[in-house]
């Protein structure tokens, strides 16, 4: 995954009333879809008993891939959420995709809006939503687009920021990929990490339900998210997942959800002075090694340039497949002997090879431009 260095002037305001006073990650839970008032109320009453749960989620309008699926209960569900808020004290959040959705939510005192992956991928829809929210003071959570496009994700935040919305939060729900096994959506953790680097004040929570696509995998995705300093979790919970009208496979029962929260390890971002000193020492050593790596890479690419000029002088093709296969086999064997991950080294070699091909191609075409 390659990133383009980019700047952003996003104005992010701390969403103080959302975070638990203990400083623990924000926990959002509830069913994928609001199916009936009884189903919604039953789920909320159980979740409200867990002090770690701060926000209740439910899909009211469901964007389905095909029109024959359950597309949500509609506006009537908002009145159910209003009652739940009054009876449990839980804040409420709903996915919106149109101006009318937003207007309905505001009328029913929904506390937080979230924008789904399909909507985020359409700049026209995002601009329409932004204009509807102009002048509003409501927190908005934005899921990543379906495709691993960081610039498109940031653009969604910028559109809302431009109309005065600064109570913003990101939701990492994974990305569509040809082969995302064992997950429903590929995590591509490097993308939310890069978003955190570019916009350091932006809270980022993880939606392990949509990444996993399978209730049996939610625990491992949740723990990975917390270990990577994600600021919270949004998890789908249903009193009877097998009977759920949408995404039945990825929803947890309330008991399974409570067990998950009890077994997750909430690690600290900082340690004591002894820890910090030791960490600083180890990081200094990594800085030295990284400097050596950069020098070695520069030396390697200089040799690639020499090879490119030599091939040009003798009218030889750039790609030498036999040589490339020899490099792959030889380097992977050595890497495995050193205890390095095979896929990591293969990815690194492919990146180096692509850059080498580009350098030699530039040399070959230098006089032809």
Image (spheres, rainbow, N blue to C red):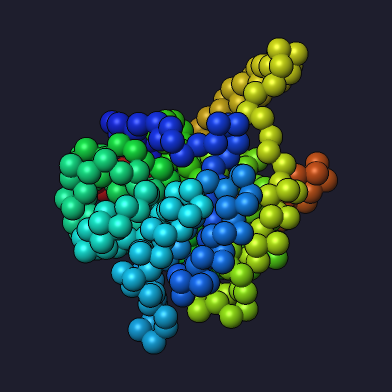
Name the outermost residue toward the bottom.
68
Residue 38 position within the rendered picture, expressed as x and y whole percent measured from the top left: 51, 72
The residue closer to the viewer here, 356 or 340, is 340
Visible residue check, residue 41:
yes
Name the outermost residue toward the front.
87
Residue 298 in the figure: left or right of residue 13: right
Point 40% across, 31% down: residue: 14
Residue 155 position within the rendered picture, expressed as x and y whole percent measured from the top left: 29, 46
Point 27% across, 54% down: residue: 106
Visible residue check, residue 324:
no
Name the outermost residue toward the right.
337
Point 41% across, 65% down: residue: 80
The residue closer to the viewer here, 108 or 152, is 108
Q: Is residue 236 above or below residue 91?
A: below
Q: Is residue 38 above or below residue 284?
A: below
The residue closer to the viewer here, 10 or 163, is 163
**Where on the picture, by quarter, is residue 273?**
top right
């Amino acid at each position: 995954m390659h990133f383009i260095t980019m700047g952003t002037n996003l104005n992010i305001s701390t969403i103080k009333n959302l975070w638990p006073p203990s400083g623990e990650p924000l926990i959002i839970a509830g069913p994928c879809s609001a199916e009936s008032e009884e189903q919604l109320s039953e789920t909320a009453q159980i979740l409200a008993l867990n002090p770690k749960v701060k926000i209740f989620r439910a899909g009211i309008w469901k964007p389905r891939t095909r029109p024959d699926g359950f597309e949500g209960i509609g506006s009537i569900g908002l009145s159910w959420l209003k009652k739940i808020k009054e009876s449990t004290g839980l804040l409420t959040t709903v996915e919106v995709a149109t101006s009318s959705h937003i207007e309905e939510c505001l009328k029913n005192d929904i506390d937080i809006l979230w924008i789904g992956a399909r909507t985020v991928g359409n700049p026209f829809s995002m601009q329409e939503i932004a204009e509807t929210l102009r002048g509003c003071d409501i927190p908005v959570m934005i899921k990543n687009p379906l495709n691993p496009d960081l610039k498109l994700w940031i653009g969604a935040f910028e559109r809302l920021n431009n109309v005065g919305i600064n109570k913003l939060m990101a939701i990492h729900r994974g990305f569509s990929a040809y082969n995302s096994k064992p997950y429903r959506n590929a995590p591509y953790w490097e993308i939310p990490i890069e978003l955190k680097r570019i916009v350091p004040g932006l809270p980022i929570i993880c939606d392990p339900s949509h990444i996993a696509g399978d209730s049996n995998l939610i625990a491992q995705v949740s723990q990975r998210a917390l270990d990577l300093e994600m600021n919270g979790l949004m998890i789908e919970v249903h009193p009877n997942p097998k009977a759920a009208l949408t995404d039945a496979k990825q929803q947890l029962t309330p008991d399974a959800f409570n067990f998950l929260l009890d077994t997750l390890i909430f690690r600290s971002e900082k340690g004591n002075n002894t820890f910090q000193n030791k960490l600083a020492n180890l990081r200094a050593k990594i800085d030295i090694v990284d400097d050596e790596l950069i020098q070695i890479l520069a030396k390697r690419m200089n040799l690639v340039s020499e090879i490119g000029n030599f091939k040009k002088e003798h009218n030889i093709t750039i790609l030498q497949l036999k040589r490339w296969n020899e490099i792959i086999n030889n380097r992977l064997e050595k890497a495995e002997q050193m205890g390095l991950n095979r896929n990591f080294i293969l990815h690194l070699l492919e990146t180096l090879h692509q850059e080498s091909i580009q350098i030699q191609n530039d040399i070959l075409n230098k006089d032809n431009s």
